[in-house]
Image: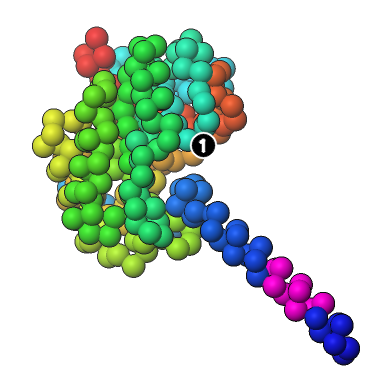
Amino acid sequence: MTKKSKMHLVIIGLSMYMCGTIFSLSYSPEEQVIPMKYKDETIENQYIEEFPLHSYDWTYLEEHNDKKQYNDSNIKAKLGIDVSKYQGEIDWKQVKDENIDFAMLRVGYRGYETGNIKEDPTFIYNVTSANKVGLDVGVYFFSQAISPEEAKEEAAFVLQQIKKHDVTYPVVFDLEFIEENDRISHLTKDEITEITKAFCEEIEQAGYQVMIYGNRHWLQDVIELGELSTYDIWLAEYREEPSYPYEFKMWQYTDNGSVAGISGGVDMNLWFEEISEAQ
C-alpha cells in the first residue's frame, strides 16, 4: 500500500469518527424513547384471590364510526384518548367536536438511561387547551423508577406539575419495560410492586384518584396485583374485546385510532361507569 493510499484511509477513518461523535452528542435516547407497544405474551393465568373479577358483558360492546361503545342497563362507557408529544400539536376543539369525553395526558417521564425526570414538552399546551374546551383530563407519568424513593420523587414531580390545572380523571403510574437499555428489567416482582405502591400512596394522600397502567402480562405476572387491590386499573389490550378477567376501570383498546384534530394514529380508551355514577 502506498503512502498516499494510507493517508486516504486515515482521512476516511477520522471523518467517520467525527460523524459518529457529532451524532452521539445530538442524540438523546430518553428524548426519543417510545414505550414498547404491548403484544400477546404468555400469561400464567393463576387465580388472584385478592382481586375481584370484572362484571362486564362484552355482548354490549359495539363499534360505530371506527370507535368502540359500551352500554348496558347498569354500565356505560365514555370515550377518551391518551396523548403525549408524539401526537404533535393537537386541535382540541376538533377533538371535542368528535364526541371525545376525556383525555389522558402524559405529564412527564423518567429517562431510561440517565434516570432524569422531564416534563412532556406538550403537557402545558395540552392540559390548558383540553380544559378550555371542556374535556375531562387525567394524567400519566412514564416511570423508570428503580426504588420506592425514586417513585416518590416522580409522584412529587407530578403533583407539582398538575396543581394549577383542572385534573378530574386519575393520575396514572405507567411503569414499563423498554425493549432494550431500560433501568428496571433486573427488578423482582416484589420490588416492582413496592415501587408502584410508593407512587400510588403519594398521589392518593394528595387527594387525587390514582390508577395503575399495564397489559395483561404486566398485571398478572410482573406485579403482585393482590397487594394493589385498592387502586383502579387502566388495561392496555389491543383486541376486539379484553381477555383480562379482573376488574379494571379503563381500557386502552387500540394505539391506532383516528380522531379529528390529531395527525396520525392515537390511543383510544373506554372509561367504564355505573349508570348511577354517570348521572
Write the start and end of the magenta stretch as one range: 8-16
The answer to whether 149 is drawn above or below residue 37 in the figure is below
Quarter of the N terminus within the rendering: bottom right
* Magenta stretch: dominant secondary structure: helix
Q: Position of residue 94 (x, y in %)?
A: 51, 13
User: Is 15 contained in the magenta span?
Assistant: yes
Q: Secondary structure at mark 1?
A: helix
Residue at horizontal 70%, vertical 68%? 16
Image position of 151 (left or right of 21) = left
Q: Residues within 10 Å of mark 1 (few under 14, many from 20)?
A: some
Residue at horizontal 44%, vertical 27%? 81
The answer to whether 88 is drawn above or below residue 168 in the figure is below
Q: Position of residue 203 (x, y in %)?
A: 18, 38
Residue at horizontal 24%, vertical 9%? 279
Q: Position of residue 51 (x, y in %)?
A: 21, 44
User: Is 91 contained in the magenta span?
Assistant: no
Find residue 3 and report its image quarter.
bottom right
Instruction: Name the residue tied to disc 1.
Output: 86
Residue that sits furthest to the bottom in the current view: 1
